[in-house]
Amino acid sequence: MSKSFSESYKAAGVDITAGYKSVELMKAHIARTKNEGCLDDVGGFGGCFGLPTGYEEPVLVSGTDGCGTKVKMAILMDKHDTIGIDAVAMCVNDIICCGAKPLFFLDYIACGKNVPEKIAAIVSGVAEGCVQSGAALIGGETAEHPGMMPIDEYDLAGFAVGIVDKKKILDNSKTTEGDVVIALASSGIHSNGFSLCRKVFDIDNNPDDLYVPCEELGGASVAQTLLTPTKIYVKSVLALLEKVNVKAISHITGGGFYENIPRALPKGYTAKITKSAVKVLPIFDLIAKRGNIPERDMFNTYNMGVGMSITVAADEVDTALEILNSHGEEAYVIGEIVKGDEGVIIC
């Protein structure tokens, strides 16, 4: 008797029935993310979403990103239920910098072997990130790649779409001398600089050292600290945008202060950051110490404890801080806008 197609495909390394089971397991997580724009259930060839009303000139803002080699940490720790938060955060934190409200999200998981429970755990994190940002998870793809990837490895990426009225798009053109730069505290390393972390902590060769309680981290292990999910700032920033004339927002990701803050500045202006005002998290001090990394390189690689910077007029600082802190952020002033072409000065 000849084998069925599914049995033959399984022998080639792709288990179709595992894919079916993954979809069934993730449906409960996806249901948590449904919002008023959702038009269909999971399982169609395309995710349908109805645009909200109330916009004069609605503009769609999209963003796509992954979690970098932070995924290696999740694999190493065999903890897969938070890395999805990172995937969502990297996308929605970008589009909120334009003033856009996230509408929906799609994920893409490539794996060496589809283990339904693992895939469902990953998607549970994606769903949590969507709940935190108000986005609906309307679709995605899980691709099994035997022979291309080791069976226990995977990669995760995502794509988000948001909406903003054209007249409310943040384009940095109103930024001027004397404006104030506010920091929103990060939850940790977020999702950038992990290749350097792996080298500094020699993760590939001595993974067991990651689980030892670390005095410099308040008793937490390096592994726990590195895998802390990226903070999602969407709801607090949306609340701020309703009340304050925000000039610009920067998502501090790869490239740190030096690459990301200038992206939200018009030509001829520089952000003067007071170094002593930045509340550097212990993990960054530990990385710099263990790796003997110069301070400028640290600020050019990591967020250093600042996940976002927001520029507002000086007379709106108190209102902005009150709103942000009331929505659960640790917000504080780190600098001001001055004339110059340096982009960022940290002094």
Image (spheres, grey):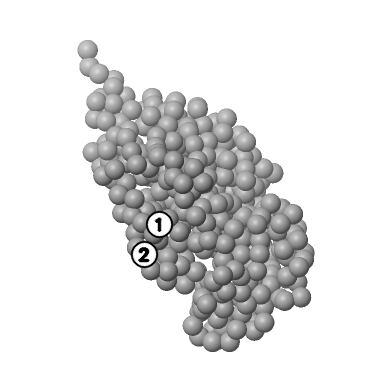
Q: Against 233, is 258 above or below?
A: below
In the picture provided, is 114 more to the left or to the right than 29? Answer: left
Quadrant in the rendering for residue 56? bottom right
Task: Give whichever of 232, 9 is nearer the camera.
Answer: 232
x and y, in percent, of residue 218 in the image: 51, 46
x and y, in percent, of residue 296 in the image: 42, 71
Residue shown at 55% from the left, 52% from the top? 187
Mark 1 closeness class: few <14, some 14–19, many ≥20 residues within 10 Å: some
Q: Against 114, is 326 above or below?
A: below
- In this orientation, does residue 177 appear? yes
Residue shown at 36% from the left, 44% from the top? 72
- In this orientation, does residue 158 appear? no
Of the numbered discs in the image, which one, if any, rests on residue 53?
Answer: none
Labels in figure, total: 2
Q: Amino acid at mark 2?
A: Ile
User: Badge 2 is on which residue?
Assistant: 293
Task: Give whichever of 200, 95 is nearer the camera.
Answer: 200
Quadrant in the rendering for residue 93? bottom right
In the picture provided, is 71 more to the left or to the right than 246? Answer: left
Task: Give whichever of 255, 198 is nearer the camera.
Answer: 198
Residue shown at 52% from the left, 50% from the top? 230
x and y, in percent, of residue 162 in the image: 60, 56
x and y, in percent, of residue 288 in the image: 40, 61
Q: Amino acid at mark 1?
A: Ile
Residue shown at 54% from the left, 71% from the top? 275
Query: Could you say whether the residue bearing mark 2 is in a helix, strand or loop?
Result: loop
Is disc 1 in contact with disc 2, using a CB cutoff of under 8 Å?
A: yes
Query: Could you say whether the residue bearing mark 1 is in a helix, strand or loop?
Result: helix
User: Badge 1 is on which residue?
Assistant: 287
